[in-house]
Amino acid sequence: MRTQIRTAEVKTLPINKIQFIKGNRDLYENHVQRMYDLIEENGFVDTIKVIKLRNKYYAAEGQHRIEALKMHNIKKIPCSIIDWVSNSFDEVHRYIIDLNAHNKGWNLYDYIKSWADDDKKDYVYLKEQIAKYGKNLSVGSIATCYDGQIRHHKLIRCGKFKITDKMFSDKLSKDLNSFIGKFGKRKANSKVMTSAAHHIFNFKGNRAKLLKAFLLVASSYITANKEPLPDGEIAFQYWFENAVVPFHNQIK
């Protein structure tokens, strides 16, 4: 049986009446500039998708284009009005992600920031850790310290992330941050740090002792060889299993 497809009505709205919605991603200046240049070259031939909630309009998709249009001094813009979304944050959040997926895809931080905006405490804490250590560690590396995933971070993206061992994850992120602060990103890039966090977090044994072994062996390797830690998943894993783990077994 065919179901009726809901179709958004297109209206022209004053641009200053469109608000940015809680849970959407941050604005990126370079992306706003790209939109500005595209609009200048080709004109604006699209619509902004907005959600109507309690007679107010919120941008669900098109924040960067709205900012670019403001820079062009545009006062009114065509909008596709989505008026069937409930006031539930989860439903609004799902719409935001689905609509933006067809444009500039969300990165990991966008998801973390969005769920933190919904006051999910583990996401709020993870966002704080990113602000604290983001100068030395990538968002992915810090996330791996708390969920053990090496790339996809599915639970983080879908809103089901839970911190399972805060004390250890805090120590892992702090120590890896200090390591980069000492040796620099050229000696241990973000892929290496993410791999290290992944192997240590998921170790079936004394993880604190393995972390200590990694820091000691990695420091000695860089100092003795005057070169970066092995890069690439296969090379790093081989080095980790044949250098770090055996040394871990010798530590009392």
Image (cartoon, rainbow, N blue to C red):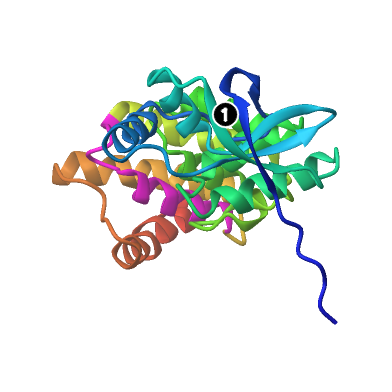
Helix, strand or loop status at disc 1: helix
Q: Residue at x 80, y 45 (%)?
A: 85
Question: In the shown orientation, is residue 72 left or right of residue 101?
Answer: left
- Quadrant for residue 57, please give it: top right
Query: Which residues make up the magenta segment?
Result: 183-202
x, y percent for residue 150: 49, 57
- Quadrant for residue 7, please give it: bottom right
10 Å neighbourhood of mark 1: few (<14), some, or many (≥20)?
A: some
Magenta segment: does it hold 196? yes
Identify which amino acid the numbered label 1 is placed on.
Gln
x, y percent for residue 244: 39, 55
Q: Residue at x 55, y 43 (%)?
A: 143
Kindly identify which residue carries mark 1.
129
Which sits in the foreground, 212 or 150?
Answer: 150
Residue 69, relative to residue 81: is it above or below? Answer: above
Decide if residue 19 is in sight here.
yes
Which sits in the foreground, 207 or 139?
Answer: 139
Which sits in the foreground, 49 or 101?
Answer: 49
